[in-house]
Amino acid sequence: MNESPLASFLLPEGFRRPPVVAVLNEARIAGEAGRWATSAVGGRRERRRAPYVAGAQQRDLDPVLLVPGFLAGDYTLRLMAGALRAEGMRTYRSRILANVGCTLDAAHLIEQRLEVIAAKRGSRVQLVGHSLGGMLARGIAVRRPDLVSGIVTMGSPMMAPAAHHRALTASLGGVIALSKLGVPRTMTTDCVGGPCARQSFEESREPLPAGVEFTAIYSRHDGIVDWRACIDPAATTQVEVTTSHVGMAIDPRVITAVTEALVRHRAAREEAQSWVATA
């Protein structure tokens, strides 16, 4: 049996891989997709009945950058982005076609994207990350609080990145095999078991700078990662949902939780600024 390419420090004591049968929870995606479809149809009917002037107004919120999970691309968060825009928020893609490259390289590209958005909008940006995307967001927020005002993670195992299903480890092994064959922009062994992995892991566990709000969303029905690894004690708010891991990207209940978190983050920052101004 081949040994796992993952470094042992990525699975700290107290966390575990989900049992093999846990992946069956991901079958919930069918119901979650149906729930989104029902919500979308209802939303369109409501907008048709409402007068034009009653439509969603542009809120005074920070722009939002969405970051996809491992093996995924921006397309997986397209429905969520649309729902956030319907609430008047400005959303941006990470421009990741498939999140299979070195995490440090991915983080660098996202930082560059943040710099462009922040300069364009004249404000810091909120990051919404699914799974690995949330872990990237967590690390970037530590390094660049000048660019990040808040983060929302969905099913992101910051506390134990290796606490994931064995099927995901197999996929990871496949990506590493491609890198050995010379396929560019794919993870290498160092990305999951060497200094690169160590740096990414440590950054995702460092204290967040003051002024950066953090909401962690998790599900006990997650069939891909250990839900306990998604509960970061540094999170300002921890929100439990009842969805599959993959379904977090489309379930209307999660989208509502994300929307509320983004609004709450801005309100908390404004309150802090008001307190400082009157102190």
Image (cartoon, helix red, strand yellow):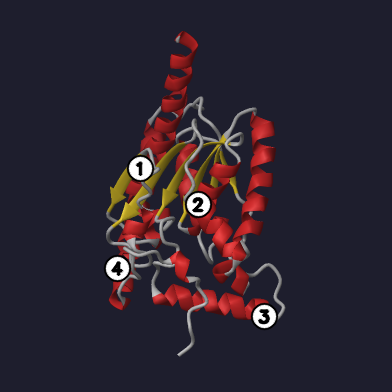
Q: Mark 1 or mark 3, which is nearer the start of the sequence?
A: 3
Q: Which residue is mark 3?
A: 180
- 153 horizontally vs 96: left or right: left
| Location of residue 160 with respect to 189 vertically, above or below | above
Q: CA distance from mark 1 to mark 4?
A: 21 Å
The circle on residue 204 is 2
* Foreground tag (2 vs 4): 2
Q: CA distance from mark 2 to mark 3?
A: 27 Å
Q: Mark 3 or mark 2, which is nearer the start of the sequence?
A: 3
Q: Which residue is mark 1?
A: 257
Q: Quadrant of the N terminus?
A: bottom left
Q: Residue furthest top?
A: 278
Q: Which residue is mark 4?
A: 25
**Are the residues flagged by discs 2 and 4 in contact, CB closer than 8 Å?**
no
- 191 horizontally vs 24: left or right: right
Nearer the observer, 172 or 59: 172
Residue 73 in view here:
no
The residue that appears at 41% across and 52% down in the rendered structure is 154
What SS does tag 3 mark?
helix
